[in-house]
Image: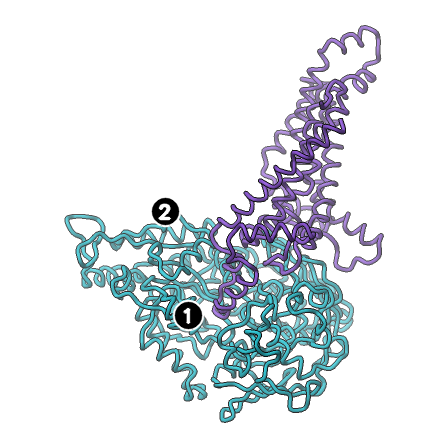
Chain colours: A purple, B cyan
Amino acid sequence: MWKTILRRFLIMIPEVIVLSILVFLLAKAMPGDPFTGSINPKADPAQIHHLMKINGLYDPWYQQYWNWVVHLFHGNLGNSYQYQEPVTRLIGGRAANTLWLALFTMILTYAFALPMGVYAGRHEGKLPDTIIRVYTYVTYCIPFFVILVIGIWIFGYVLGWFPTTGSISSDATGWLHTFGSRFYHILLPGLLGALFGTVNIVQYLRSEVIDSKHSDYVRTARSKGVPSKDIYRHHIFRNSLLPIAAFAGYSITGLLNGSIFTETVFSYPGMGLLFVNSISYRDYTVITALVLIYGILNLIGTLLSDIILSIVDPRIRIQ
Amino acid sequence: MDKKKLALSAMAVLATVSLAACSSKSSSSSKSGTSGASVQLKAAYKNTKATDKTATKNSTLKLAEPNDSPFQGIADPVLSTNAEDADVFSPGGDQPGSINGLFHTDKNFKIIKGGLANQTINRKAKTVTITLRKDAKWSNGSAVTAKDIEYPYEVIANKKTTSQQYSADYNAIKGMAAYHTGSAKTISGITFPDGQKGRTAVIHLTKVTPAMKYVGNSFIWSSVEPYEYIKNVPIAKLASSTQVRKNPLFTGPYKLDKVVEGESTTWSPNKYYYGKTPQVKHISINVVSSNNIDKAIQSNKYDFTVPNSVMHGTDYKQLKSVKNYKIVGQPALSYDYFGFNVGHYDTKTQKNVMDKNSKMANKSLRQAMMYALNLDAISKKFGNGVTWRANTLIPPIFGKYWDSSSKGYPLNIKKANKLLTDAGYKKRDGSKWRTDPNGKKLTIYFGAMTGTSAQAAEYQDYLQQWHKVGLNVKFTGGKTMEMNSFYSTLQAPKQSKIDVYAAAWGLSSEPTPTQIYGEDAVYNMGHFVSKKNTQLMANMNNSKSWNDAYRAKAFKQWQKYMNEQAAVAPGSFSYNWGPVNKRVKGFDMGAANNNFWTNLSLTSSSMK
């Protein structure tokens, strides 16, 4: 298995190179440049040209690409044109925020969805199942940003239970206070994200549970007299997790994607908004860095999913 | 009122405008009055209640900065390029838009005595002398020196700078060009009669102009840099340094306690401030999503939004009658306009050239297109009173220069038709479209930037109105354009994709328009040039215009001429407005209030 993993890693290298060239070319193909947005009556075009020049933006693409690769191997992803600070520092700060929120949301989502899915499957066709199904479909139907706006309005502004902006309160000092304040700030967006993001897991799990319920090994276990609680815990649950494990790898690497909606509504500085803004501002250095990171994460995600699957299901072994 | 440079980059303005457009604009009764808006807003909130001294001493003044993305975090006005940074760091200056500002101003942005420094212009010697007050100090206690007046020029003009502020106008300072190209190590034209540590800097120029009497002009930089504090940071790395981002120094009434990157800033009184002691104990400024700023205000979360930050017209509708708040506002330092493509930019001579044969070269055609538009109705329909049809190319915030008597282009279909027919644009062979005077088919392409759905509706209305007078106007490329491709297209030296376009300009507090409409201006994207126009703009800063009355007249003559030519025609003006909680006392966002922050006090400890 280690061999396989190593091989997969080696294949990733050419993939990443191709990806980076594509990203680089596509970014440059967009109309405009990092300074298009700064035209105003007092910004002299000559100075803008000067800035373009010293930033190497007039060089041919392969030269720009080469410079970028050379810098990359020195751990330097360049400076953001929009934020005027090193890309690594910029992304670092945002990634930490996003990771916090996404991890919390993911844990909550699984904590809500797994029991619901199993319960619905176990009581197929009965009232609890109907309630859970209706709940997941309703939450699935409402656009997430509507949920966020309503959520922040009711719980943030009207009831005042939760903070409404940012990732930390401005007067937080000391380790404990900082941690607490950060947690308090992700509580509402995390809860909303989890409560309204259960549909996939619940539905997959439910149908798997229903399938397993009627499979031979369950019937065998039942006829042997194994208590139904144990059947669910040891036989059905584990087998039903297979499809969920299949995308668990992606959801781990997806932790860094960020959500534009959550970040906008809660003024939460994260990766999602950074990505979107960098595209509209033509902040090339940030765009290429982010796409590359996402690309690599996706490749790792595929690998992780395979590994997780092989752990959950001993029948599957990567060869 | 941004006194530094332009707080509003074009992009910020576009955002404002595109967002404000979903809402604002108003008034058909644009006679004169303060602005022509249907709503009359005042820059000051006169709270008659008595100050609650204990509440003022112990409370935090909570400000919101409505914005949809995190701020960049560059506290230095020399380096920052956007309005948000200027907003969240504004308590570091005497008044919003004046971080580490040198000068105080009157309501016309004219420099007056009494600020961090005074300025004297010597017309004979062609020098500008800036003298710091004796007690001018940075928030760390060290003195503000003459070198601190000079250092911004070094940062702006340095070869490796990340600042976008350098412009050809700075070449009027002796030795500046040499420093900019790197052939000189210092700027020879800035001298220190009593040494670098002294209080006086003298700027030697090749010419002095009346524009220099106003803050925000493009010759004299109007803020200081803490040279001693940042001298060891290479200029190329200044924008990312902790001295500028995490622990910046200020000369204003408040000092920065903490900045949470992209989210918030907190402030407490700067005990080294030369002026009146600030009354309120703390200030906090938080970025609040513009999606829910109205909810935030309705639930009494903030005292006010940072003056001149972007508030949408739809929010005005929501907030105008909220119980605990008073709406304040003043005309914005920006305007929407229609531009017509009448020429090209000659890259060899670096001058704009009019093409007599261009599609839009006919003045009657341009005027007719403007008369065909129903901008008043659009304001009424989508407006909430905070945006209205513009009558000239100088916004009413410049009270002295704005031509209030100008009518602009109100709807007049009859006149539009007559103008077109008289000029030879006739419908031939029963066609529904007019042809050009030579009988050839005429299709006019309208370039517009993608914005809100309300803005899309406005564009559709423009097209309909033009169709009404028989002009076949279509969107360039069949639809609205993304901002970057819009400007890439327009800024090409020669282009024929866009014949008429809608855009916006944000202005500095000194409104000389040569940088956008001059013969050699790259930003003159419609390429309208005439001898008379060049002459009229030159009049604004000739030797006679040291006389204020003459200068005002020169501005008005120019507005009249531009309106008549209709190569660039006024679209809309809008208010910079915001809600102020009724516990706040002493609020006045006008340019003449040079003690904005120190005048503030509270009448209660609660916002409810």
Density class for disc 2 (Cα within 10 Å; few <14, some 14-19, many ≥20) is: few
Q: Label 1 belongs to which residue?
A: B521
The residue lying at 47 percent from left, 69 percent from top is A41
The residue lying at 35 percent from left, 60 percent from top is B494
- The answer to whether one can see residue A128 in this image is no
- How many numbered markers are drawn? 2
**Chain of the residue under the numbered disc 2 shown in the image:** B
Q: Is residue B375 above or below residue B107?
A: above
Query: The residue under label 1 is which amino acid type?
Result: Ala
Q: Position of residue A126 (x, y in %)?
A: 69, 18
| Quarter holding residue B72 | bottom right
Q: In the rendered image, which quarter contains the C terminus of chain A?
A: top right
The residue lying at 31 percent from left, 64 percent from top is B342
The residue lying at 61 percent from left, 46 percent from top is A260
**In the image, is A199 to the left or to the right of B334?**
right
- Ranked by sequence position, the earlier of labels 1 and 2 is 2
- Please state which of the two labelled residues, at mark 1 or mark 2, is closer to the viewer: 1
Q: Label 2 belongs to which residue?
A: B478
Q: Secondary structure at mark 2?
A: helix
Q: Secondary structure at mark 1?
A: loop
Q: Nearer the viewer, residue A118 or B195?
A: B195
Density class for disc 1 (Cα within 10 Å; few <14, some 14-19, many ≥20) is: many
Task: Report the disc number at residue B17.
Answer: none
Q: Nearer the viewer, residue B483 or B273?
A: B483
Q: Position of residue A118 (x, y in %)?
A: 74, 23
Q: Is residue B304 above or below residue B114?
A: above
Query: The residue under label 2 is which amino acid type?
Result: Gly
| Marks 1 and 2 close (CB-CB < 8 Å) | no
**Chain of the residue under the numbered disc 1 shown in the image:** B
